[in-house]
Amino acid sequence: MSTERPDPEDILARLQEEEAERDRGRLKIFFGANAGVGKTYEMLLSARKLLHDGVDVIAGCVVTHGRKDTEALLDGITVLPPLKVEYKGTTFEEFDLDGALERHPTLILVDELAHTNAPGSRHEKRWQDVEELLEAGISVYTAMNVQHVESANDIVAQITGVTVKETVPDSFFDKAYEIVLIDLTPDELIQRMEEGKVYLPEQSKVALENFFRKGNLIALRELSLRLTAERVDAQMQKYRSAELVHNVWPASERILVCIGPHPLGYRLVRAARRMASGLHAQWFTINVETPTYSQLPKLQQDRVTRTLRLAEQLGSQTATLTGTNITDEIISFARRQNISKIIIGKPAKARWREQLFGSVVDTLIRQSGNIDVYVITGDASVAEGGTVFQKQKFLVAPYLYALSVVAAATALDTVLFPYLRLVNLVMILQLAVVVVATRWGRGPSIFSSILSVLCFDFLFIPPYWSFSVTDTEYLLTLSVMLLTALVLSTMTSTIKKQAEMARLRERHTSALYAMSREQASALTKEGVLKASLRHFNEVFSCETAVFLKDGTRKLVELKELSTYDVDAKELGVAQWVFINDQSAGHGSTTLPGARGLYQPMRGAIGTVGVIGIMLKDVSNALTLEESHLMETFIGQIALAVERAMLSEQLAQAIGQVQNA
């Protein structure tokens, strides 16, 4: 355990989370790879133990499929009568949600979480019924199979050839207080099927020839084990955060790859992807932005953005960190995320620079503790080419300004020299260094630091008008003055860059908040879009075009809201984006010949339209952080438009009913 002082923000977040969960029921999911592994049986066994301990337990909906041993476990448990729902002349028996809320037991059993309710029920899905029970403070035991997890749906379809229609969102699955894996080997499950313990003999024969083939069962079992392991890993991460555990617990492999403007970044990302795939490990890609990052040539900044995007395409989680010390930021991130392996490239600096200024790789290896560090070599083409960085264009103007400021401070010192002590004259020159650092950055500030010391020595230290020093005491004064000036210039430049980043993030947050507030007061989708696009165009310095879907799966441009002309080619790109639910256009790898970048507007129910974006400065590509911010804005706009469209449809339906 660490004795470090906890972060107040983390404490506040935990307290808020505990307060929100205090009156909420707890969800326990009995999870398995397939039907027949014994989920309902284990759920009933656990319920009977609680019933024996005096807990108020009832069975809201338990599906036994006629299995005698499972039905026997219901003896002594109060069973809530089912709700009969009539639909098109057919009567369906469904879980009685209102009856359960009125009875309000401590614990209720609700089987088959992914079930779709009969038309006319309050909720479309049973998991929504369970959510209402939890909100009412009733704890729930339920059961589901791996094929019903939303994120696993496509994988199950590839394995079995069957697309499961009934799914549970991952967000709800993650709300479970506890997930119990009910595991059974494929051979044992097949034997149970053949003995008729899962389905009737006729059904079992058909199932064994289709969904329950041994290969399918093996793959589904692995998938369920993996999802459960991810859930356990998330619980461990939460515990480490709550208990302030900073040591790495290598219970599972987690890989971190560190990239920068070096061309080696692509190779590092691909190497990390191969390692993560071989170890079935989660992996992260980070870039640390120091105060000097903004001074890098645009080519190198764009390279970082492209490398992070490649990592995302290959399945990595990405993050951009800010700080003054690269090694400290990497180690801090690695410990927070419980990283077991770090991948970094070989240093690109000359050996003498490493000896003089230190090496990130060497420092990282020394400070990594029980985290393994892998140092990857670069491509031969990079090594042969000498330096891997593009030389930054040297700007003379900032140095001339620095010279002018130091000259002005020196002139003032000359006037005040007969009246002030030397220490006060030094303060005036130090102030000049701070002014230069604040206005023109690190290079000119270091230049002004050295220049101010030289001017002070030349004009105010005896012998005057000479750089020689007769009194050793003045040598110490000049050394301290130079060191102080250098520290001041570096710190001031760093603080300036951090303040600029903070102001930019604050402006983005304020714009997002203002946009959300105006969206809430808009009554129509046109009003929502008009308010949203004004903030969107201002934040990203762009022009936009908006397309919404009609009843025939085609897009219609809202010309009155578009700020650039859309021809047939651009409309075709937007239509492709809508159909395929993928971004395309300028700056992307799909249909890059388009003038604008087109992004799908995804709402809670589906894609409501497409937004076209044309940057005013097309040569200035978006950073990865800006791209994520743009996706956040578009997602917020899509949700607001979707709500407005649903409100309009509801108003039309009410009007039709009233007219009828």
Image (spheres, helix red, strand yellow):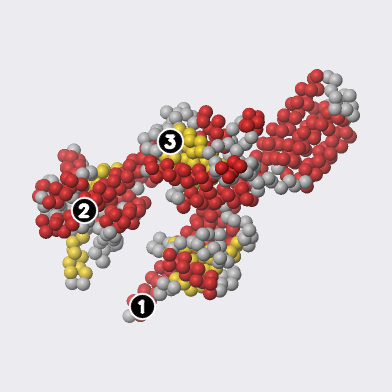
Give me the residue at 27% from left, 50% from top: 220
Q: Quadrant of the C terminus?
A: bottom left
Provide the residue designation for mark 2.
Answer: 213
Provide the residue designation for mark 3.
Answer: 340
**Which of the marked residues, 3 or 2, is nearer the chain's N terminus?**
2
Residue type pointed to by label 2: Arg
Q: Secondary structure at mark 2?
A: loop
Give me the residue at 59% from left, 44% from top: 382
Residue 4 location in percent, x, y?
48, 29
From the viewer's perspective, is residue 529 above or below residue 260? below
Residue type pointed to by label 3: Ser
Label placed on residue 79: none
Query: Is any part of residue 428 visible from this angle?
Result: no
Mark whose residue sits in front, 1 or 3: 3
Marks 3/2 in contact by CB < 8 Å: the verdict is no
Provide the residue designation for mark 1.
Answer: 656
Q: Secondary structure at mark 3?
A: loop
